[in-house]
Amino acid sequence: MVKIIMGLKGSGKTKKLVEMVRAAVDLEHGDVVCIEKDKKLTFDIPYQARLIDAGDYGIDSYERLKGFVCGLHAGNYDITHIFVDNFFKLVEDKSSEKLNDFVAWLEDFSARENLEVVLSVSAEAETALTRVKANLV
């Protein structure tokens, strides 16, 4: 399952994502992972969630992010939730088409691997394409 929190800067996306991370840690029995560009959420998310600074791994494209997500899951089948904060800070191409294609891949991957993935995206929800709009929360 893929969920997307979309809005412009200052609209409360990160706050909502943090609340979802806390709920996942409290309610689920699997591992929770939170990916962000910098470690700004260190004191906001519970210590039980694994916080990963994607900047340490040179993630700058959709292909590298796909590989990173696949590698995370391959290394730990107990992961039930993956949260990605400030998604467009991770990838260089911020086009609606590339995001739509990535979400389509992520839907297939998360369904196959029984994961819940939440993305926080800084963009206007009205500009989103079909796949993205279908997953907005």
Image: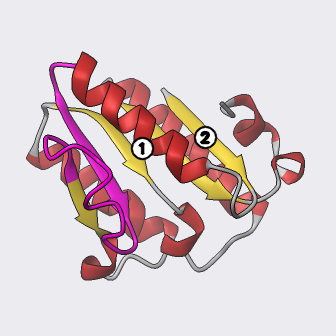
Query: Which of marks 2 and 1 precedes in the sequence?
Result: 2
Q: In this view, does 53 lie to the left or right of 77?
A: right
- Residue sticking out furthest to the right: 126
Q: In this view, does 5 lie above or below 30?
A: below
| Residue visible at 34% across and 58% down in the picture | 35
Real-space Cα separation, disc 1 to disc 2, in angstroms: 13 Å
Q: How crowded is mark 2: few (under 14 residues within 10 Å), some or many (20 or more)?
A: many
Mark linked to residue 4? 2
| Residue visible at 40% across and 64% down in the picture | 65
Q: What stretch is highlighted in magenta?
A: 28-50
Q: In this view, does 136 lie to the left or right of 114?
A: right
| Residue visible at 10% across and 48% down in the picture | 75
Point out residue 25 in the picture as x, y percentages from the top left corner. Answer: 24, 29
| Residue 9: quarter of image | bottom right
Point out residue 64 in the picture as x, y percentages from the top left corner. Answer: 39, 70
| Residue visible at 31% across and 27% down in the picture | 24
Q: Which of marks 1 and 2 is in front?
A: 1
| Residue 114: quarter of image | top left
Judge whether residue 113 can be spotted in this image: no
Instruction: Say which amino acid is labelled 1.
Output: Val
Q: What element carries label 2?
A: strand
Residue 49 falls inside the magenta stretch: yes
Point out residue 123 in the picture as x, y percentages from the top left corner. Answer: 75, 60
Point out residue 12 in the picture as x, y percentages from the top left corner. Answer: 63, 49
Q: What element carries label 1?
A: helix
Residue 56 falls inside the magenta stretch: no
Q: Mark 1 points at which residue?
A: 18
Q: Quadrant of the C terminus?
A: top right
